[in-house]
Image (spheres, coloured by chain):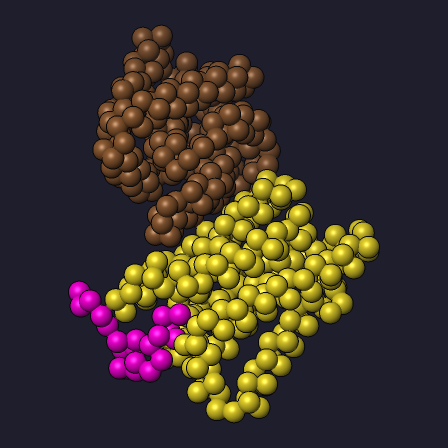
Chain colours: A brown, B yellow
Amino acid sequence: MTPEVPVDEDGVTAHRDAVIDLLGVLMYAELRAFDRLAEDSRFAPTLDGRAKLAAMAAAEVGHYVALERRLRSMGVAPEDAMSPFTDAIDGFHNSTRPSNWYEGLVKAFVGDGFAADFYGEIATFVDASTRELVLSVLEDTGHADFAVREVRSAIDADPQLAGRLALWARRLVGEALTQAQQVIAERDNIADMVIDGAGDLQSIGALLKRISNAHGERMRALGLST
Amino acid sequence: MTPEVPVDEDGVTAHRDAVIDLLGVLMYAELRAFDRLAEDSRFAPTLDGRAKLAAMAAAEVGHYVALERRLRSMGVAPEDAMSPFTDAIDGFHNSTRPSNWYEGLVKAFVGDGFAADFYGEIATFVDASTRELVLSVLEDTGHADFAVREVRSAIDADPQLAGRLALWARRLVGEALTQAQQVIAERDNIADMVIDGAGDLQSIGALLKRISNAHGERMRALGLST
């Protein structure tokens, strides 16, 4: 085994540091997603719901393992890649602890959806094989349908819940943006790659617009106003 | 899909209720094992150790899913099979919360090993295909080697730890037996099957002796006195 393999089999080594950062932030995000789903599974009103959330948590670990394999093939230790991002991701999760089952579901659906769109946009700027891997780990693990079904039926039963959950979703997005800005301020790699790749401010504007539109769609799917 | 399939493809339906109980108790034990490994992963001194425990937690969910499939093929709902055992298993875990990383590892290795031997002995009395499934989900998921390595090196660094962890292991086994007795007092199915299958008290004595010997071996592997 060679200690260091180029980023892409095609020989693309552009933005190697940004690729490592992307893998590192995603790996730690997967570990935390695992933690959170595992914790939330205890709020589940039924043993069946609990088992479903546990299965989703297990899927996140599968994603982690796939990302780790890629990172190691680049000769980078998991700890080194993840450690720059642990504070920001922990900060996000510590400041948005769901206080009940429905807040947990909204966080999983709206929060993870938002993050997936964000990382998916970044992935368009990396080499093809990393991109394919990143997009595959960002794929929904069945959580989305489950969350929409549970939240919608809860709102049908108690319409007042919609207002409280809409506020909660706004707080989630606000906290996510705060933490993302902090990471970008400290780590240039990903931002440089996006600015390089997008070419101009208009493209970056379009990218942000896509993320924002997809967020609005998710909120509507839950029956929540943005 | 037929609503109710016999216990075994060979048509063996003996002790159907005991098979359902065995699947139910194991399913809930897997869900709790998942919970516990997920919780313990947060004590891990490194991100790498944390990822390893998360992977083990994910393996427990895989076991749960396999057992659930079997149960559903018998026309039984997961909730119905698990609910008679939730109090005892919760009782065990609530009274044996690890207060640090090493207690968690000892609990996983000694406690799970003990439970695996116990369920493995019961599985000798059920139909062949259920037995095969049960033995496969009881297989160690890589946790054992990991726990032995970590605990032994911690004891080398701090020999006083051995005494504290040995006491902890004794408490784990004591609590496990208390809860097991409570379940047996309330649910006859499994006990009846074992008594039927073993034939005489001498065989049951031999069964308990095997479990006890294997426990002693695990304690020695960790460097702990029994």
Give me the residue at 52% from left, 47% from top: B38
Considering the whole magenta stretch, tell me its main secondary structure: loop
> Which of these two is toward me, A127 or B76?
B76
Residue A124: quadrant of the picture: top left
Q: Which segment is the magenta one?
A: B1-21
> Which of these two is toward me, A85 or A222?
A222
* Residue B13 in view of the camera: yes
Give me the residue at 29% from left, 65% from top: B76
For residue A11, above or below residue A224: below
Q: Is residue A143 left or right of residue B50?
A: left
Give me the residue at 31% from left, 28% from top: A161
Residue projecting furthest to the top: A201
The question of residue B2 being in magenta is answered with yes
> Which of these two is toward me, B52 or B23?
B23
The image position of residue A42, as x and y in percent, is 45, 45
For residue A163, above or below residue B42: above
Give me the residue at 64% from left, 62% from top: B172
Q: How many marks?
A: 0
Residue projecting furthest to the left: B1
The question of residue A117 being in magenta is answered with no
